[in-house]
Image: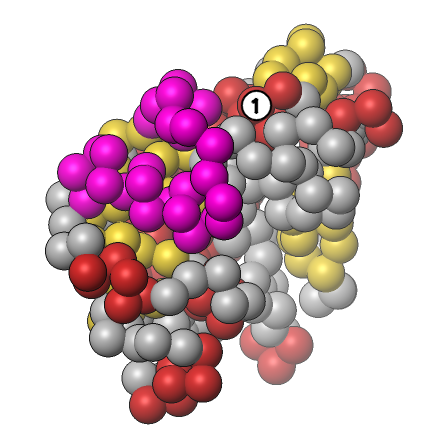
């Protein structure tokens, strides 16, 4: 089984959905501490002039040291209207805005929600729009014992869910959190994403293309072709024999 274990980001970038389209099971890593200004609570879009801008969830200060699955957000009409108005101003002239806007805006319901559930539902709904089939479980529901390191937690989770191969973002590997060969010792192959971000038309000016924007940027501009576009950047490296960060250049 191909498995990814990653936090539930808010309106993630296109490589996130390439990851989900690659694996059989996504373990939503929600029993870890919420990091201030992380992609769990914000993401980038691109305005009509080609400048990046942030869309952010409102998280009360008392939740900044809580786990993601313990963090509540209150989504009110004022916040939602500000998001909708910003996206309308940015993307009204995008080719597929009228086709996708209502559906995407409806993915932002109002009320009080657990952050992990709110983001995961958005991700699952966007997967349906794209045509990605994915099974999702929450790490907080696996009842794993405490672990000494992030790798111990990930490796134990991967073993518990029956992973034969584990897929992780490039930055996660380069941060030094993992020793991939230890996964191999447990008969789990380790793959690092080396995503080659494709360019698509962001309005008329392709010279100022901004990569790593939220998936909604791709959807508004490329519509039904979005899944095909994001697959263009797919590249995974088998780094199962990697013993250290220093040995990674031989894989890249």
In the image, residue 36 above or below residue 144: below
Q: Residue at x 28, y 73 (%)?
A: 239
Q: Horizontal placement of 112 versus 221: left or right? A: right
Q: Which residue is mark 1?
A: 69
Does 24 appear in magenta?
no
- The residue nearer to you, when weighing 164 against 226, is 164
Does 141 appear in magenta?
yes
Image quarter for residue 129?
Answer: top left
Q: Residue at x 74, y 16 (%)?
A: 74
| Residue 211 percent across, percent down from the top left | 56, 67
Location of the N terminus by quadrant is: top left
Q: Residue at x 51, y 21 (%)?
A: 117
Which residue is the extreme one toward the front? 148
Q: Residue at x 62, y 14 (%)?
A: 113
Q: Residues within 10 Å of mark 1 (few under 14, many from 20)?
A: some
The answer to whether residue 99 is visible is no
In the image, residue 22 above or below residue 251: above
Location of the C terminus by quadrant is: bottom left
Colouring style: secondary structure
Q: Horizontal placement of 105 versus 224: left or right? A: right
Q: Horizontal placement of 188 versus 151: left or right? A: left
- The total number of labels drawn is 1
| Residue 25 percent across, percent down from the top left | 25, 38
- The residue nearer to you, when weighing 251 against 131, is 251
Which residues lie in the magenta part?
Answer: 137-163
In the image, residue 156 above or below residue 75: below
Which residue is the extreme one toward the bottom? 250
| Residue 19 percent across, percent down from the top left | 34, 53
């Amino acid at each position: 089984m191909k498995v990814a274990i990653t936090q539930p980001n808010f309106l993630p970038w296109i490589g996130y959905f390439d990851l989900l389209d690659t694996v059989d099971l996504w373990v939503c890593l929600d029993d870890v501490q919420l990091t201030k200004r992380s992609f769990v609570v914000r993401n980038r879009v691109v305005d009509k002039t080609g400048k990046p801008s942030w869309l952010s969830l409102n998280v009360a200060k008392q939740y900044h040291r809580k786990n993601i699955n313990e963090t509540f957000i209150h989504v009110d009409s004022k916040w939602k209207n500000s998001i909708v108005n910003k996206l309308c101003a940015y993307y009204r002239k995008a080719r597929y805005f009228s086709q996708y806007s209502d559906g995407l805006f409806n993915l932002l319901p109002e009320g009080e929600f657990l952050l992990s559930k709110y983001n995961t539902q958005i991700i699952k709904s966007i997967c349906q729009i794209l045509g990605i089939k994915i099974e999702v479980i929450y790490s907080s529901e696996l009842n794993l014992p405490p672990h000494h390191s992030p790798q111990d937690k990930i490796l134990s989770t991967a073993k518990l869910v029956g992973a034969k191969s584990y897929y992780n973002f490039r930055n996660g590997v380069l941060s030094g959190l993992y020793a991939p060969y230890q996964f191999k010792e447990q008969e789990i192959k380790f793959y690092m994403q080396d995503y080659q971000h494709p360019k698509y038309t962001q309005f008329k000016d392709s010279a100022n293309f901004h990569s790593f924007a939220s998936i909604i940027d791709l959807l508004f501009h490329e519509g039904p072709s979005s899944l095909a576009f994001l697959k263009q950047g797919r590249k995974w490296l088998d780094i199962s024999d990697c013993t250290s960060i220093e040995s990674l250049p031989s894989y890249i």
